[in-house]
Amino acid sequence: QVQLVESGGGLVQAGGSLRLSCAASGSIFSINAMGWYRQAPGKQRELVATILSGGSTNYADSVKGRFTISRDNAKLTVYLQMNSLKPEDTAVYYCNADIFTVSGSYMKYWGQGTQVTVSS
């Protein structure tokens, strides 16, 4: 079994910062891409940022220059540093990872989500 567990969400004032973490565990052989998505009330889930195992990153235009994605391959963990937060960043944030398991399967796994609320 594979699990992704997020942490670090919460309530912050506009202009503030939060750091999200997502740790993978279980029967993992290796992890390719890892990423963060978010879903605001009444809206579709959208990409925030992704990072490949080699470190290449990609960001949504709405977060470029404010958010930074990083990963620690030894800890099987991906992070999202969020600075200069805006009320429109309020959403449930989900991490995902493309994982090769020790049994030979390859699929995308999702975390349970963590709430980020930015007050104005």
Image (cartoon, rainbow, N blue to C red):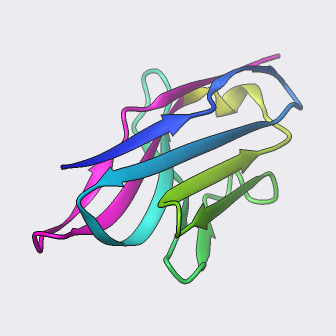
**Left or right, 98 with reference to 49:** left
State which region is magenta: 92-120
Percent of width and height locating residue 86: 78, 32
Q: Nearer the viewer, residue 52 or 15?
A: 52
Q: Nearer the viewer, residue 39 or 68?
A: 68
Relative height, residue 110 to residue 116 (above, below): below
Q: Nearer the viewer, residue 28 or 86?
A: 28
Percent of width and height locating residue 90: 63, 26
Which residue does the image show at 86% across and 31% down from the upper left?
16
Which residue does the image show at 89% across and 31% down from the upper left?
15
Q: Residue furthest bottom?
A: 54
Percent of width and height locating residue 89: 67, 33
Taking the magenta stretch, the answer to whether it contains residue 104 is yes
Which residue does the image show at 40% across and 52% down from the upper left?
24
**Left or right, 86 with reference to 7:** right
* Quarter of the figure with residue 49: bottom right
Magenta highlight: main SS: strand
Percent of width and height locating residue 98: 32, 65
**Left or right, 67 with reference to 8:** right
Q: Residue furthest right?
A: 15
Which residue does the image show at 59% across and 64% down from the upper left?
71
Relative height, residue 91 to residue 11 (above, below): below
